[in-house]
Image (cartoon, rainbow, N blue to C red):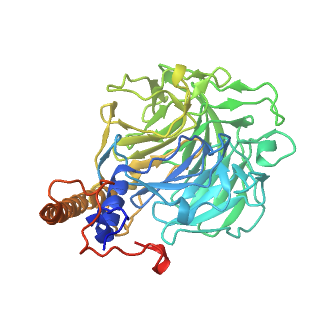
Amino acid sequence: MTSSKNFHFNNPLRHHPLCIAILFTLILRVDSAFVPSPRYSVSSILVDKRLFFFGGLAKDSDGTESCQSSVYYLDISTSFDTDNIPWTDLTKTASIPERICWQVNGGGVNSSIVYLFGGITQNNLTKEVISDTLVFAFDTKTQQWTKPSISDTPPERRRELSVVQDNSGKMFIFGGLTDPLTGSRSTTWFNDMSILDISNLSWLFVETSGIDIPPPQADFTATMLSNGTILYIGGRQSDSASGTNITYKRMDQIWTYDTNKGYWRLITTVGTIPGVRAGHSAVLAPSGRIIVYGGVSDNLLTPASPDLAVLDTSTSPFQWSTPNASGTPPPVLAYHSTTLIENYMIVAFGNKTQGTSRGASSDIYILDITSYAWVTAFKSISPTKTSYDTIQSSDLSTSTQPSSSKTTYSKFIPVNTALILGVTIGAVISVSTLCIISFLLFRHWRKYRKRFGDKLPFSDSITPPADIQMPDLHEGGGRY
């Protein structure tokens, strides 16, 4: 009995769905490495051997710029280059409870808890500005967020500031500003000092002294020296709390705060004085050098010049120099994140400030501070060499880490190692799958040629021989 139904080629791939699924999954995993979207005003902090990044300002899928609830980290226990950055995205499983940007953070290093302070917070769904939570806590081990209960009177919410943290876990919070973007009815610039004591979760308002008290200011960097003195470099200042007559702070005039005596002092530096700037970053090298990078000047429109400057605090008076770094420099960035890890200064995200390349960045740049060379490769930290006096972070959104503390590292497979293993296993499975498919196709071709000769199996003019039973497409739910 013959049938008018066309003969359908029996695709051998249908019999091996598991192999196909594995093959396509591996291809997707290898070819679609995660890259964060461009952003700025991100906060970052080093915890064990993971460099975490929180929030920031970035464009949503509808093209509008909003704060983000993102959480990413870089595994610094493995080497990587800037063309293949081993990002890990925790946003789907451990996103910040609210969208946040312009915040600062503390904790980390010898503690698994990170504390995010201030900034702009928005509702995750409506993007409405909210200001009911001043501090969020993130446990990097459990990857859980909480709203810690902190005793005593907190400072006002603020943004565009930098904080430092001493060895006892005290975060020194100075300056910044609040405005309608932070949930305030008006704009206020600050010159007060508060301390968040992480060890016992309490607030302390500091009564300061000195011949002079610094004016209200924002957009500076804060760096703590080994003797407990904090240097507030660059930024902008106002004549009053209302934000009138805003000017850039001279880079040769630096406000210092003695955390041991609670004493302010304005010092004058010498050397090759760099240009004024805001939105820059600063890290402290073991030799006492403060390395300043990036920023903007002239009403936040022009790149700071030079982009790289160094303040030597081992001399008296402190002395500026402007080294010419070798290698390919990044575009001058502002409101970025900078972290010093051993001899590498890692610059992440930020706003590009030059020419046609203006806009937010999602890139990582690396400066080798031993030779002042921009490099493309990061060499992993050796556990025997790790010393937290050489790990510092400082920018508008990053807290300076305490020095000289012992640390244990969680056991996990480095991302690069896992990627290599995945690619290798994927290649083996892919080759095996292709061999199986080729064998099945060849076997099917031999059977077909034996029955039908050289005619094509999918030709409409071909009807199957009488001995081939074709299923009725209307039986059993119409499946074939």
| Residue displayed at 51% across by 25% down | 357
Residue 353: quarter of image = top right
State whether residue 260 appears in this view: no
Does residue 114 appear left or right of residue 235 in this picture?
left
Does residue 357 appear left or right of residue 104 in this picture?
left
| Residue displayed at 62% across by 57% down | 116
As rendered, which of 47 and 17 lies closer to the eye?
17
Counting from the top left corner in percent of width and height, residue 290 is at: 46, 36
| Residue displayed at 54% across by 39% down | 336
Counting from the top left corner in percent of width and height, residue 319 is at: 46, 26
Counting from the top left corner in percent of width and height, residue 293 is at: 48, 32
| Residue displayed at 18% across by 59% down | 431
Q: Residue at the right extreme?
A: 185
Quarter of the picture containing the N terminus is bottom left
Q: How many marks?
A: 0
Q: Residue at the bottom extreme?
A: 476
As rendered, which of 194 and 317 lies closer to the eye?
194
